[in-house]
Image: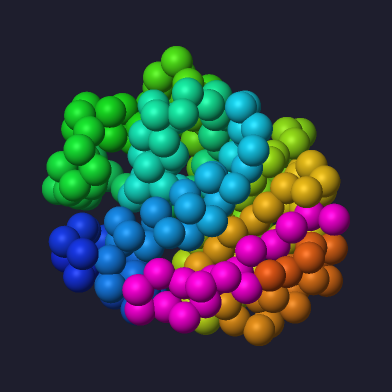
Amino acid sequence: MMRQLILTEDGSHTIFVPALGEHYHSVHGALQESRHIFIQNGYQQVPFNAISILEIGFGTGLNALLTLLATETDKKLVQYEAWEAFPLSEEEILPLNYPALAGCDPALFSTLHRSAWEIENWITPCFNLKKVCGNGVQFQSNQQFDLVYFDAFGPDYQPELWETVVFTRIGNCLKKGSRLVTYSAKGQVRRNLRSAGFIVEKAPGPPGKREITIAIKQ
């Protein structure tokens, strides 16, 4: 799959996939989008000292990096399982400027991507990463998660990832009161989440996006 490096409006990189006509992040700002949706409306809303996180769409690793950096401040213990069907190559990862903008060691970001797939990897004493090669349609797990970062390509491009059956399968692996956060605010996505047994809420979006979706496991 051909991919192109793009500079977004907040100075951070994203990747564009010409075959899909889709970007990995908002062109209004990749870094600020991830912080707003997944850290501020996701990670920071979970009150536990130990958190189990599922990410659908590992992509550039930005959400994982920001979560890891958050643990270095609050010392929470995070078990992080990320599903990605099309991993980036090392040549695609190297130019990404997230470490410089986030003020962290580039080696930390590199370690996220170089860590082995399908097994647990302790990246830091507080952050344990397991990467799985697969997408939301293939998702299955015996784990129970506190939080889901649903960051797959949009429902206009890969609608099969946003169906009720996928959200139901994920919901079966969530504890009561767990939350799922996603950038998509489409009405059909929200209806599918409700059909899967979630309580669905709206929240203000990051720059360039009016609303995002938060879903709570009943």
Question: In the rendering, at what x and y percent does residue 93 appear?
Answer: 23, 45
Question: In the rendering, at what x and y percent does residue 177 appear?
Answer: 78, 49
Quarter of the C terminus within the rendering: bottom right
Question: In the rendering, at what x and y percent does residue 26 appear?
Answer: 34, 70
The answer to if 19 sits in the magenta stretch is no
Colouring style: rainbow
Q: Nearer the viewer, residue 140 or 106?
A: 106
Q: Quadrant of residue 52?
A: top right
Image height check: is 2 above or below 93?
below
Residue at horizontal 40 percent and vertical 69 percent from the top: 206
Residue at far bottom of view: 187
Residue at horizontal 50 percent and vertical 68 percent from the top: 183
Q: Quadrant of residue 15?
A: bottom left
Q: Nearer the viewer, residue 75 or 160?
A: 75
Is 189 positioned to the left or the right of 177 in the image?
Answer: left
Question: In the rendering, at what x and y percent does residue 216 appear?
Answer: 74, 58
Residue 90 visible somewhere in the drawing: yes
Numbered range of the magenta stretch: 202-218
Q: Quadrant of residue 78?
A: top right
Residue at horizontal 66 percent and vertical 84 percent from the top: 187
Q: Nearer the viewer, residue 137 or 182?
A: 182
Image height check: is 25 above or below 128?
below
Residue 23 visible somewhere in the drawing: no
The answer to if 207 sits in the magenta stretch is yes
Q: Nearer the viewer, residue 23 or 209?
A: 209
Is 160 positioned to the left or the right of 109 in the image?
Answer: right
